[in-house]
Image (tube, rainbow, N blue to C red):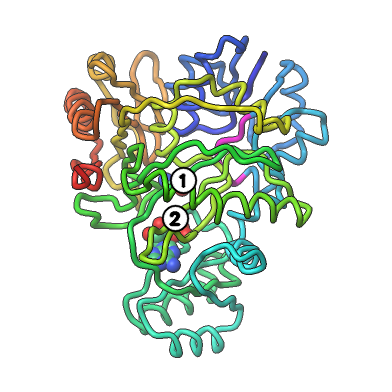
């Protein structure tokens, strides 16, 4: 069958890499893709928000499955448009994508269905927001309701900082996305990303991963999309994973069905492992980036029939096999990321780095100029490695990182520190 993947990051390269291994695959297309994806798929320059052109492309190329990588086209209704045109899509409807697109929607759903999450209030009025912050004190967390490119959350250490964040957001810093706020209780604990495939009725657990959100070593510096990840996450024990499935994921799937917005796709639960058990920080309606890069490295089963089963409502008869090994990913970003990444520098020696045992390098922001590989984004390369444990995977990944000749880039040197501390 012919498959179309939507997106251009390392997550989409990893998905294309996994799908390419499927004996069911005939032709793989990606829209718009990047230089690494172009080695596996035919890349097409169509704007994913031009729904009619995407649908036309699917009809012309006899696409049997569309896999949507990022959240923005889902929140905008791409999956609805394609489904209405009779095309099979792995990814939620706009209504179901509100789980990520509106934090207030997600919190209200949890409240209605008893799903464990931080206590909260919703505000569109500054005076009431300020009074709530004053009454609850710090630390406290201020969130813009809508999509704000990962910048819409402030974990405030003081009442003043919280008031300033509320003022800025309601004052229009994120436009319509910040016209409404969620203000919530600060949760203490270790953070874990957990993923499940969902077919509208059934949820099939995938695996857990841990991300590294800050730009610099020691979890310092500004928040980013993610500077590295590993899977499994040793802190999410099998017992905790069962608890997450029973108390958070399955009740959410049932709630969405009951409320007329069945969820189809991958549900990404951002969890805090608190002293009172796992609590939901946020939902994303897509794979994580760079979490997808480590999940695909550990998956031993064919991903393509799993996506089809999610679309066709047959996940209850499905199972996936996972490697017991650890997969770890180091993100190489352009100097200046996340504020102002410098574009256009050349990357050399990637082939030698990728030749190291059990290393696979995924591309994010890259393009070709003739035979030269050029950095063309914030996060540029994802060096992944597997090993018997986190220490071995990490040693391999950094051995490859050190062979990449790219003075225009940087990376964190401490990816996996939490897993190593677990022993
Ligand atoms: P989000 O965009 O919702 O994932 O939030 C970004 C980051 O803020 C999360 O990854 C957490 O590290 C932190 N965060 C969000 N909500 C809370 C909370 N209630 N308590 C503590 N930290 C939080
Ligand atoms: N790495 C976090 C995310 O994809 O949202």
Please tell me which residue lies in front, 366 or 200: 200
Among numbered discs 1 and 2, the one appearing first in the sequence: 1
Q: Are marks 1 and 2 in contact (CB under 8 Å)?
A: yes
Q: CA distance from mark 1 to mark 2?
A: 7 Å
Label 2: which residue?
271
User: Residue 9 in the image: x percent, y percent?
Assistant: 46, 34
Q: Quadrant of residue 314?
A: top right
Badge 1 marks a residue whose secondary structure is strand
Which quadrant is the N terminus positioned in? top right
The answer to which image quadrant residue 346 occupies is: top left
Picture layout, residue 48 above or below residue 171: above
Q: Answer with left or right where residue 115 lies relative to residue 89.
A: left
Label 1: how many residues lie within 10 Å, few (<14), some (14-19) or many (20+)?
A: many
Q: Residue at (49%, 15%) from the top-left corner?
A: 40
Q: Is mark 1 within 8 Å of ligand 2?
A: no
Q: Residue 393 location, x and y as percent?
A: 24, 29
Q: Is residue 334 left or right of residue 302?
A: left
Eyeballing the image, is 24 above or below 390? above
In front here: 335 or 404?
404
Q: Residue at x 65, y 49 (%)?
A: 253
Q: Secondary structure at mark 2?
A: strand
Magenta extent = 67-72
Query: Which residue is label 1 attached to?
Result: 194
Residue 274 at x, y percent in the picture: 38, 63
Q: Quadrant of ligand 1?
A: bottom left
The magenta stretch spans residue 68: yes
The quarter of the image holding the C terminus is: top left
Q: Position of residue 176 (x, y in %)?
A: 61, 65
Vertical order, 80 against 318 (above or below): below
């Amino acid at each position: 069958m012919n498959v179309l993947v939507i997106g251009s990051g390392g997550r989409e390269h990893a998905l294309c890499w996994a799908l390419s291994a499927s004996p069911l695959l005939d032709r793989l297309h990606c829209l718009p893709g990047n230089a690494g994806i172009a080695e596996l798929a035919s890349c097409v320059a169509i704007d994913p928000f031009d729904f009619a052109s995407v649908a036309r492309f699917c009809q012309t190329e006899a696409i049997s499955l569309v896999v949507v990588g990022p959240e923005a086209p889902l929140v905008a209704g791409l999956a609805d448009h394609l489904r209405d045109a009779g095309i099979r899509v792995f990814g939620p409807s706009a209504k179901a994508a509100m789980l990520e697109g509106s934090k207030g929607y997600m919190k209200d759903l949890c409240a209605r269905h008893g799903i464990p999450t931080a206590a909260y209030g919703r505000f569109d009025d500054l005076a009431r927001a300020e009074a709530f912050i004053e009454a609850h004190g710090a630390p406290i967390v201020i969130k813009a309701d809508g999509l704000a490119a990962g910048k819409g959350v402030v974990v405030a250490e003081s009442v003043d900082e919280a008031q300033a964040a509320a003022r800025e957001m309601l004052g229009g810093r994120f436009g319509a996305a910040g016209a409404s706020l969620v203000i919530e209780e600060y949760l203490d604990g270790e953070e874990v990303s957990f993923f499940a495939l969902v077919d509208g009725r059934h949820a099939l657990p995938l695996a857990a991963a841990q991300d590294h959100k800050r730009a610099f070593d020691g979890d310092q510096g500004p928040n980013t999309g993610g500077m590295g990840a590993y899977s499994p996450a040793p802190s999410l024990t099998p017992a905790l994973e069962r608890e997450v499935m029973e108390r958070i994921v399955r009740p959410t799937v049932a709630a969405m069905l009951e409320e007329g917005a069945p969820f189809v796709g991958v549900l990404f639960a951002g969890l805090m492992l608190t002293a009172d058990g796992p609590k939901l920080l946020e939902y994303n309606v897509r794979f994580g980036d760079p979490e997808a890069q480590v999940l695909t490295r550990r998956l031993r089963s064919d991903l393509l029939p799993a996506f089809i089963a999610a679309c066709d409502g047959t996940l209850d008869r499905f199972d996936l096999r996972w490697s017991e090994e650890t997969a770890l990913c180091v993100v190489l970003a352009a100097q200046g990321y996340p504020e102002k990444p410098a574009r256009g520098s050349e990357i050399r020696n990637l082939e030698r780095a990728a030749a190291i045992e059990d290393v696979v390098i995924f591309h994010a922001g890259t393009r070709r100029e003739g035979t030269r590989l050029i950095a063309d984004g914030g996060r540029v390369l994802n060096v992944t490695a597997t090993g018997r444990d986190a220490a071995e995977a990490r040693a391999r990944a950094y051995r490859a990182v050190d062979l990449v000749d790219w003075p225009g880039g940087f990376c964190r040197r401490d990816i996996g520190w939490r897993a190593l501390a677990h022993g």
